[in-house]
Image: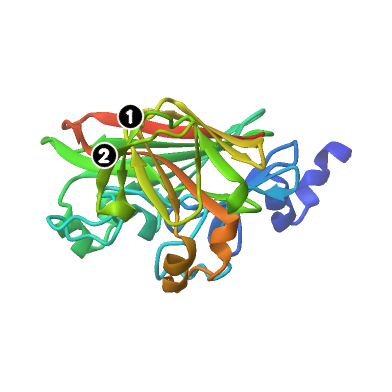
Amino acid sequence: MPCCLVFFLPFFLISYLMPAHETSHKSILLKHPSGAEAEVRLFGATVTSWKVDNTERLFVSKDAILDGSKAIRGGIPVVFPIFGTDEKIKLPQHGFARNSDWEYVGLLTDNDEVSVRFSLKDNQLKQSQRSAWPHSFRLNYTVALTEKTLRTTLVVKNEDEDTFEFKTLLHTYFQISDISKVAVSGLSNLTYIDKVQNAAKVVEENQKVTIAGEVDRVYANVPEEVTIEEDGQAKYRIVKTGMKDTVVWNPWIDKAKGMGDFGDEEYHNMVCVEVGSVADWVKLGGGQTWTGGQVITAL
């Protein structure tokens, strides 16, 4: 009978037809009925692909290292529990979340939104990492896909009795055609820390932020919505929740040449607009949880 044919399909074909399945290279592939797709590596729980209308929306460098030996250069790396480096906390740049193997918890929903969850707990870390940041925690990370949107949500639970502090960020690399035609709106009149200018504090006077050189800025207390335009047309809308700040980054010519996992000319085709809470430490009491995330819409 036709209703029973599914039992005779090869296992790999059944897996392929599911809205979320594990691939041969340790990733989870999400498929939406509209044709939209997303891929999440178990290493770092890094989203490395998001396709809408058969077009890739995230940038991953052609030189990115994908063997688990270092963080992936592109997609959406998860930054936790530090931002950058901290002389008091002896962890790698941006912490351990993007350099750790996460557990795939499974498929959460399968209707208009296909969503999956990943988790990372302190007992999954290397001993050196646990010594550098000696707290009991659990991270739950949800990636959800619809026809036009990608939602990424991080939940931090403090499983200690004492309060701990952290910083976190979703380090999103957007695929663009020409950086000279890109503008970011929604940041006007905000104060930012300019990391290119020795961490000087500057007030953004432009209605739209354009990029014509190295940019590395931490905008504090940013409104919920920011838009990325290209050639005068809105291309991406980013709506954040629970996160206070937004980072804008492009390495430009010299920095691009200095990164071994980034092509010399690739700065033309990417811009990072990253939601997070990094200007100040987030304090989380024992037993408490904190939630932050973003919804990105392809326009």
Relative to 2, does residue 75 appear above or below in the rendering?
A: below
Q: Disc 1 on helix, strand or loop?
A: loop
Seen from the viewer's position, the closer of residues 235 and 134 is 235
Disc 2 and disc 1 in contact, CB within 8 angstroms: yes
Which residue corresponds to mark 1?
A: 221
How far across and how far down the image is residue 282, in percent? 23, 35
The quadrant holding residue 113 is top right
Quadrant where the N terminus lies? top right
Question: Residue visible at 38% across and 28% down?
Answer: 189
Looking at the rendered structure, the kind of residue marked 1 is Asn
Question: Residue visible at 56% across and 54% down?
Answer: 270
Badge 1: how crowded within 10 Å, few (<14), some, or many (20+)?
Answer: some
Left-right relation of 78 to 288:
right
Q: Of callouts 2 and 1, which one flags the residue occurring earlier in the amino acid sequence?
A: 1
Which residue corresponds to mark 2?
A: 279
Left-right relation of 38 to 290:
right
Seen from the viewer's position, the closer of residues 258 and 8 is 258
Quadrant where the C terminus lies? top right
Task: In the rendered structure, find residue 291 and report the number of the disc placed on it.
Answer: none
Left-right relation of 111 to 90:
right
Q: Disc 2 on helix, strand or loop?
A: strand
